[in-house]
Structure formats: C-alpha cells, structure tokens
Amino acid sequence: MSERRGWDVIIIGGGIAGASLAYFLTERGVTDVLLLERESQPGYHATGRSAAVVVEWDPIPLLQDLKVQGARFLREPPIGFCDQPLLSKSGILVTFQEPAWSAVRGLVPSFAARGTNVDTLSQAEVLDRVPVLAPEHFGGGVFFPDDGHIDVHSLLWSYLRHARRRGAEYRWGVEVKGIGVKGDRVTGVETSLGALGSRWVVNAAGAWAESVGKRAGASHVPLTPHRRTIVTFAAPAGFDVHNWPLVTNESHRLYFAPESGGLFASPMDEVPMTACDAQPDELTVAETIERLEKLAPLLVPRSIRRSWAGLRTLAPDRVLVVGEDPRLRGFFWLAGQGGCGIETSPAIGRIAADLLVDGTTERFDAGALSPSRFAAV
C-alpha cells in the first residue's frame, strides 16, 4: 500500500454498492476516493452469489421505481462503459395463484405507468411458454420481456475500471477495524494497515453494515442478513430450456431459470442469521426439490450439480438505507440492498453520489431512503 494516508471519501465494501458509488462519484468529479475490501477480491459475498437478474416487479412501489431506473442504465449503458451487453433480455415470468392473481392483474396498469414493459398472461399462455408448470398451482402470470440476466462480473468491473481511470483507488485484503471519530464527525478509518483519514466514510459493508455502524457510534439502523439458497441441476430430457425465462411462483415461493446448459432454482428462503460466509443448508436444498416436485414435477432432478448461498441484508421495512447519518457527520449509509442491490445499483449509485456531493437529489425521494427514518426506533 502507498504511504498516502488521507482521502476525501473512503468506501468500506467492494461489492456492487461500493463500486457503483465510486463510479458515480468520479463521474461527478469527486476523484479523491479510496475503496476498501476485506476479502482478496471484490464482489465476493452477496454480489457474487446473486441470481443476477433484473425483475421490474416488486410489491413495494418504491423499490419497483428504483428497479425501473436501474434497468434503463443496464439496457443502455454509457458508450464505452463495457465491451458487451450488460443485460440479456431473456424475460421474467412471475406467476400467482388466487386470490393474489386477481390483485396483481389490477396492478399491471401501474407497472406500465412507471415505464415497465409488461404483459398479462392467462394460465394457458403461461403453459405455452413453460409447459412443465403444474396448472393447479397458478392462475396466470405477468411477463416482463425486457428484463432478464445481468452480467454481474462485467457490471462490477466496469464500475471499478472507470472509477480507477478517473482517479479513484482501491485496496483488496484490507480489514476495517474501527472508525475514527472526533466530536460529532468521522475522521477516517482504522485498518489492518493503520489509520487512514477522510472527510467521508461510506458504510457499504453489506451484511456487516450494522456492525460497522455500531463501531462508529452512529445511529442505530437495524439491518439483518438473511440467507438465500440456489441449487443447479440438469434439465430434463426432451425439453429445450435454453429460451425459457426466469419463472417465479410468488404464491408458493420458488423460482427457476436456465443456467449453463441446465437449470438453477431457489426456494426464495430468507433465514435470518449473523453476518458470515454463508453456506447452503441441506434441509433448504431438500425443500427446493420438494417445491419443484409440487410446482414443476417434470423438473425434479436425479441429483444436484451444486448449491450455494448468499446473504440478503434487509432493513425492517425492506427499503434500502442511503444517506448521511443523522447524528454522526460524514458517516454515510449505503446498505440494506436486500435482493435488489445489483439491479438498482445504477439508480442508487447516482442517488448516493448526489447526496454526498450536493446534500440533496432530484432523482428520488431521499427521505424514504434516509437512515433518519429509524431515529425514533
């Protein structure tokens, strides 16, 4: 590491949140930025273990708006941002059973009003696209033809590459052990390589964000990591799954999609746990197969190719936490991304950069994201 010991902004966390902020800060002309990551590579935890899709469906309208904003960037990134498309428009199909299906049909016009391309499909139309589904467990679905798979590796490294080209620095394998504070303002961070000074410290530490806030003596922001499990397996003989969309059954909590010549599936588990290097649980893997057997019995595999797990960190209201801490000046929260951190990163990175540089943003209702909403808790 260089002998330099001071920066304008230090970002804790080398996942998609920290990388996107570094990119958008340097785009705004703030280039005195240092990104720190404890692991030996960026994107090791939640970013690298995501299902990696854009899904412009969310029961929380605020999150849906952020997904719509993020999807615009992913479909049409700036010229020269990356060498290949970031988004493969494989489509997303979300199915529901009654009474949820009737309620969702009534919401479809509001999706379109937010700028989302969406089709309503009857049960028969859903089965035309994905014939393995058991019809007794869904009444219909909504199809998002412009959504699909994200090239997360390309997105993450494009953020980092352009930020570094503009002057930002990053360090892997450096652990943040404490936050320097003087009075009511941060002064930097204590790391495994010594003290580093800064005007701003950004808490983009993912599953560890709450503990970083506690170390700083910042406001209490309740953030809980939840394990999410994914398994991969061979596609059944006689079915060409290559062009299938990602299929979700919201009523019975399962999704599956094509992956590397086969399929992957998740029981959409959300098991609260402490921050860790998450590993799959055998019972949850078995539950995935049980749900497949119920909802798409022809997909049940003879064996599992592999399984993995990641952590989705959620605030109690499931909305991201973005903004300066109300009691510790210079300490900035960029946390609580849940399961939508990658797809919303183009929107949240811009919003966070605005708030750091200008103290306000015209892109979104910053108050809805602010850590101040927990001040009375």
Image (tube, rainbow, N blue to C red):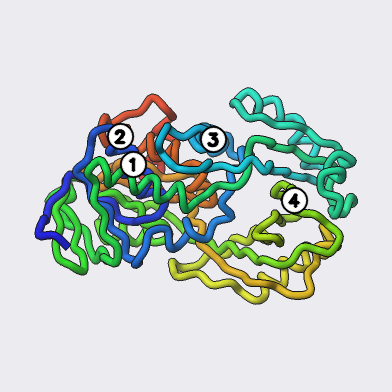
Q: Residue at x 71, y 62 (%)?
A: 262
Instruction: Give whichever of discs 3 and 1 has the lower sequence position.
Output: 1
Dot 2: what SS? helix
Instruction: Classify mark 4: helix, strand or loop.
Output: strand
Secondary structure category for the residue under label 1: helix
Q: Is residue 365 left or right of residue 101?
A: left
Q: Residue 267 at what x, y percent from top left?
A: 68, 61
Q: From where the camera sits, is residue 58 visible?
A: no
Q: Where is residue 254? Give x, y as percent.
A: 71, 56
**Relative image position of residue 108 (x, y in whole percent):** 71, 30
Q: Which residue is mark 4?
A: 249
Earlier sequence position, callout 4 versus callout 1: 1
Which residue is disc 2 drawn over? 27
Q: Which residue is depicted at the point 78% across and 45% down?
A: 96
Q: Label 1, on which residue?
A: 23
Return the residue at label 3. 75
Callout 1: few (<14), some (14-19), or many (20+) C-alpha neighbours within 10 Å?
A: many
- Cβ–Cβ under 8 Å for marks 1 and 2: yes
What is the quadrant of the N terminus in the image? bottom left
Give the CA separation, mark 3 to mark 4. Answer: 25 Å
Q: Nearer the viewer, mark 4 or mark 1?
A: 1
Q: Is residue 367 left or right of residue 8?
A: right
Amino acid at circle 1:
Tyr
Q: Is residue 19 above or below residue 177?
A: above
Give the mark nearer the N terminus: 2 vs 3: 2
Residue 337 vs 288, above or below: the answer is above
User: Of tags 3 and 4, which is closer to the observer?
Assistant: 3
Q: CA distance from mark 1 to mark 2?
A: 6 Å
